[in-house]
């Protein structure tokens, strides 16, 4: 029987069948300060232990300052949450990469960097962007805090088998088009809830050509289409990325692992519940205009209006979104001024993203009407960028260069926008209030964000090609 | 042993109609309240940005449906497509239950939110778009209309209208009996051990 990649990874982890549900084993559990304290409290109340502390890794990312290493830099509540994580990790013998540690970073950036994520693994974290790790051919998904507690106590989860969706991106990308544009175009096509109850497998020539960093950007936003997870079959690009990383297998174990990983692909003849195809050449630089990631257009397309939608729900959503965003149907993005630019997050806070930003940043200066911050995804990304001199390019051009963390993607620290601010952001959610109450977020690629910073309005990155 | 906490059987109450699609968990409970290390006390911040005109939560927004006097005391929330999308934060169902909601009836739910409801004795019910239209119409006609949800029978009834809904057997069982999911899994310890014993050394 021909199997999909998802089928293979799923079946390799089923421990037991409980009615229509399966009990599946979890190979890797990542935790952070925001969604774990109540889970540890639950364990402690019942006198339960962490079953596999060796499979569990923690970092501090959401609630931390990007200007200071002090835990109290963002107030006593944030400090208490960070201290609670440190205390829980110490009591339960879980490895923690705290603020200031050289391996600290956004959980979905530092995990792959350390080689903690391997093909064929099941990976969970109390964070919806856990989908990121599907880039390695792992089955990775976000869970709630009760499930975090369940995994801590049992190293398992009860799950129903998901539906499968194949998303094939044919051909080659045009110059200036990035992984972020691919995933935004996909979400625009299938909708903000288009993949609900599905696990997506991304494939096709344009996907195979992507680096691991780019594949992570794609899989990261699977949740923004409602998907349970997104996966990409591992290949030589994957193996080359992993070889030599701290927690990746070594020696004979490496050879055994690679032999297994090479079996992780969708068999010829396997079928998917849903199939979607896109032509890479059709994808333009993407900019969201509304308040969910499915409300997205190419940079040269006029802003749509309610009348452009036939579905009454989408019509009403468009009306509400335009009112919140303070723009009108027919507006040109090139005429819309931005007040802020945020570059970073688990979607676009990796070294290749920063290189793309630098290539634009060195062509000018940040507009005087724009505040632009660059937040590396991890300590390792920060050090690499500085070794390449990118920080100098950024600061010379007028960007602020910060310490690693989640930062303005969700604003749990003091990197927050004010009502009416308009931000070109490389993050993943443009929900109302996501970056600050009343603030307006437009999702874009790192290069597009840099171009907007220089121009002071949305700009077409293709006009900046050297 | 698996212990039993309170379970859900039949729920009867009035409804609060939040007639919009894609209500995300950032709206249900915004980020500034996520620094708490407890599960309690999120209800007062539920739908903060829409519910209050000020940051200190002193000025309720009279236009927001949760603040309308006719919907005070509602225990059932009505909404539309893709309710609970976005962040995995379980603070969202914690806020809804702490506020007093016992069920959310919507056209569809985001997966993680739906699962989180099941772990918090909050009953998520998906009805068709047409059925939701009828339910919204019934509440618009009479805000005091009692809605009865019979979980074992899987029905929602308002006035003369009644619809059935789907729910997985294990979810229903856990909600009705209020079972401790971790306790149940720990009873399978031997199977988990034998699975682990067969994993490759490099994992």
Image (cartoon, coloured by chain):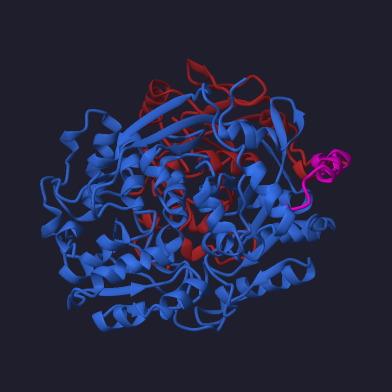
Instruction: Give the x, y percent position of residue B151.
Output: 64, 26
Does A414 lie within the magenta span? Answer: no
Query: Does residue B193 show up magenta in the picture?
Result: yes
**Residue at 44% over, 64% down:** A350
Looking at the rendering, the stretch of residues picked out in magenta corresponds to: B183-203
Query: What type of secondary structure mainly makes up the magenta span?
Result: helix
Residue B35 x, y percent position in the rendering: 56, 67
Q: Judge left or right: residue A202 versus residue B196.
A: left
Q: Quadrant of residue A275?
A: top left
* Left or right for A351, reference A371: right
Q: Is residue A404 visible?
A: yes
Give the image location of residue A122, x and y in percent. 65, 45
What colour do you see for chain A? Answer: blue
Q: Nearer the viewer, residue B20 or B113?
A: B113
Q: Which chain is red?
A: B
Return the residue nearer the eye: A466 or A196: A466
Task: Give me the residue at 40% from left, 37% from top.
Answer: A204
Q: Nearer the viewer, residue A259 or A152?
A: A259
Residue at point 60%, 26% (across, down): B167
Q: Is residue A131 visible?
A: no
Q: Pick the residue in front: A214 or B50.
A: A214
User: Would residue B164 appear left or right of A29 to someone viewing this image?
Assistant: left
Q: Position of residue B65 (x, y in %)?
A: 38, 45
Instruction: Indicate the quadrant containing the N terminus of chain B: top left, top right, bottom left or bottom right.
Output: top right
């Amino acid at each position: 029987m021909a199997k999909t990649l998802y089928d293979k990874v799923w079946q390799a982890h089923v421990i037991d069948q409980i009615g229509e549900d399966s009990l599946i084993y979890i190979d890797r559990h990542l935790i952070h300060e925001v969604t774990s304290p109540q889970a540890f409290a639950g364990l402690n109340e019942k006198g339960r232990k962490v079953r596999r502390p060796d499979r569990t890794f923690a970092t501090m990312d959401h609630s931390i300052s990007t200007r200071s290493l002090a835990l109290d830099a963002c107030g006593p509540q944030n400090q208490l949450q960070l201290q609670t994580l440190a205390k829980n990790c110490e009591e339960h013998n879980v490895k923690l990469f705290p603020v200031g540690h050289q391996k600290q970073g956004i959980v979905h950036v530092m995990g792959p960097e350390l080689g903690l994520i391997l093909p064929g693994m099941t990976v969970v974290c109390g964070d919806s962007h856990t989908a990121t790790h599907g880039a390695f051919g792992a089955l990775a998904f976000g869970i709630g805090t009760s499930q975090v507690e369940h995994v801590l106590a049992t190293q398992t989860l009860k799950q129903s088998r998901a539906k499968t969706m194949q998303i094939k991106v044919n051909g080659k990308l045009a110059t200036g088009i990035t992984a972020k544009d691919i995933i935004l175009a996909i979400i625009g096509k299938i909708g903000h809830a288009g993949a609900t109850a599905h696990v997506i497998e991304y494939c096709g020539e344009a996907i195979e050509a992507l680096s691991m960093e780019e594949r992570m950007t794609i899989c990261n936003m699977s949740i923004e289409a409602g998907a349970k997870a997104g996966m990409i079959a591992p290949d030589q690009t994957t193996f080359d990325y992993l070889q030599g990383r701290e927690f990746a297998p070594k020696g004979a174990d490496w050879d055994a692992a690679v032999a297994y990983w090479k079996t992780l692909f969708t068999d010829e003849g396997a079928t998917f519940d849903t199939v979607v195809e896109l032509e890479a050449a059709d994808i333009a630089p993407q900019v969201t205009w509304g308040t969910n990631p499915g409300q997205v257009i190419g940079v040269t397309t006029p802003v749509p209006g309610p009348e452009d939608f036939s579905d009454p729900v989408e019509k009403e959503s468009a009306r509400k979104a335009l009112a919140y965003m303070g723009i009108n149907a027919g507006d040109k993005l090139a005429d819309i001024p931005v007040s802020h630019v945020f570059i970073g997050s688990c979607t676009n806070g990796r070294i290749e993203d920063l290189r793309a930003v630098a290539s634009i940043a060195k062509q000018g200066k940040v507009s005087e009407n724009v505040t632009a911050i660059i937040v590396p995804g991890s300590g390792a990304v920060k050090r690499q960028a500085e070794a390449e001199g990118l920080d100098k390019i950024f600061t010379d051009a007028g960007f602020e260069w910060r310490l690693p963390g989640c930062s303005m993607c969700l604003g749990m620290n003091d990197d927050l926008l004010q009502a009416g601010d308009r931000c070109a952001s490389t993050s993943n959610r443009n929900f109302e209030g996501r970056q600050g109450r009343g603030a307006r977020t437009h999702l874009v690629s790192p290069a597009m964000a840099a171009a907007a910073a220089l121009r002071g309005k949305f700009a077409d990155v293709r006009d900046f090609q050297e | 042993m698996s212990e039993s906490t309170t379970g859900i059987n039949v729920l009867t109450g009035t409804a609060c109609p939040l007639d919009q699609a894609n209500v995300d968990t950032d709206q249900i409970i915004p980020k500034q309240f996520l620094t708490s290390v407890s599960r309690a006390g999120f209800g007062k911040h539920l739908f903060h940005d829409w519910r209050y005109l000020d940051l200190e939560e002193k000025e309720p927004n009279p236009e927001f449906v949760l603040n309308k006097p006719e919907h005070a005391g509602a225990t059932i929330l009505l909404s539309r497509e893709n309710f609970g999308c976005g962040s995995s934060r379980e603070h969202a169902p914690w806020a809804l239950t702490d506020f007093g909601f016992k069920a959310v009836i919507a056209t569809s739910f985001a997966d993680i939110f739906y699962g989180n409801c099941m772990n918090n004795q909050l009953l998520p019910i998906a009805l068709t778009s047409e059925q939701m239209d009828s339910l919204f119409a019934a509440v618009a006609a009479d805000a005091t209309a009692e809605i009865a949800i019979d979980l074992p029978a899987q029905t929602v009834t308002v006035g003369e209208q009644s619809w059935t809904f789907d729910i997985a057997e294990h979810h229903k069982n856990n909600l009705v009996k209020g079972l401790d999911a971790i306790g149940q899994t720990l009873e399978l310890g031997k199977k988990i051990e034998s699975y682990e014993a067969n994993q490759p050394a490099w994992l």
